[in-house]
Image (cartoon, rainbow, N blue to C red):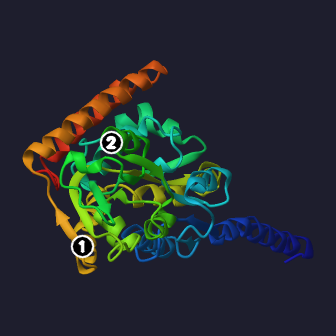
Amino acid sequence: MSSSRRNLIIGGASAAGLSGFPAIVRAQQKFEVKVANFVGPQHFQSQWLVKWGEALEKKSDGRLVFKHFPSAQMGPTPKHFDFARDGTAEISYILHGSTPGRFALTELVNLPYLIGSAEIGIKVLNDPELRSKYLDAEHRGTKVLYLFTHQPGSVHTTKKALRSLDDFKGQRLRFSTSAIREFISSLGATPIGVPPTEVAEQLQKGTLDGAFTDYGGAGIAWKLGGICKYTTELYCFVSSFAVVANQAWYNKLPPDLQKMIDQSVTGIEKEIGGGWDGLDVPGKKAMMDGGGEAIRLSRAEDERLRKIGADVTESTLKTMEGKGLPARAVYSMMKSLAEKHAKTSKNFWA
């Protein structure tokens, strides 16, 4: 073989090897995924996020590398959406109610007596038409992975048992969303905004008399057993959340990783919703083990509160419509979806 032909073959082989090299590098490129999370590592949602990340790490052959920051390690709850939007975190677990008015249409799901379980809540919020028409646009700068709620919440108090509407008067009660703030005011109590991480401390100091939250939040996340003596079981509201990703980061991922992430949050309604609903029993046990008493209102008192809830809903819709927001259309869609899914889902009101 002539030297010129030998050089040509070697050169061609070298070129072929080099042309394949970038593809190999790309295939092995790792992508860090910092996850901002405001609840403690023992909470169901924290544990789900860890397991979800582990599954994606395995499926991606280690190209996705998750690092979790629970217990608001990155910063206060109200900043968690911006952590994802500005890239401080690649993924963030957010509480819509921590930034009142920012997610006005999404928060309509929090209005009193609309959602009967977390399973219903997640099915309503992830309805494709509802999201594409109204909700995803409120999360600009991020890719919404999924929206969800906790199971219906009640009110937990430190000193006074709330057995009737009149008992609410003058009580300083923590609210989680603007809708519940108005509901508390209409009950004759004083609504006070307190971040989740400070609820137990404020109750112990006496600057709060009680808090509206679900049993999972009270008994497990905030460890209020022994702090709150009474729980009036209203099951009257939910708080909405989202898990969102930085849009620019997501857009830079290879298509196969994008698809992998998308598929990982498809069809999870029963798993997530059922997980949150399942917190009710152990959360209540933690509260009762701490010496708490569970109270159920009489039917007459419950009807009084439901009437107030309906008035708060109508007032909220009128106020938002006055600002040019399609609040009634969104609420009507949510209500219709909630009634539909209540027939085939866990329902605390059934």
Q: Which mark is residue 292?
A: 1
Front residue of 316/267: it is 316
Q: Residue at coordinates 71% horizontally, 67% vertically from top-left?
A: 20
3 left or right of 344 in image: right
Q: Reply above or below: 239 against 304.
A: below
Q: Residue at coordinates 70% horizontally, 70% vertically from top-left?
A: 25
State the CA–CA distance, disc 1 to disc 2. Answer: 24 Å
Front residue of 240/92: it is 240
Disc tally is 2
Q: Nearer the viewer, mark 1 or mark 2?
A: 2
* Label 1 secondary element: loop
Q: Reply above or below: 247 against 41.
A: above
* Label 2 secondary element: loop
The three-letter code of the residue at mark 2 reads Gly
Q: Can residue 147 be spotted in the picture? A: no
Front residue of 226/280: it is 226
Q: Reply above or below: 330 against 52.
A: above
Q: Reply above or below: 134 against 281.
A: above
Q: Residues within 10 Å of mark 2 (few under 14, many from 20)?
A: some
Q: Residue at coordinates 48% horizontally, 71% vertically from top-left?
A: 53
Front residue of 317/228: it is 228
Identify residue for label 2: 188
Of callouts 1 and 2, the N-terminal one: 2
Question: Where does residue 234 sit, x and y in percent of width and height?
Answer: 21, 53
73 left or right of 271 in image: right
Question: Where does residue 294 sit, x and y in percent of width and height?
Answer: 18, 66
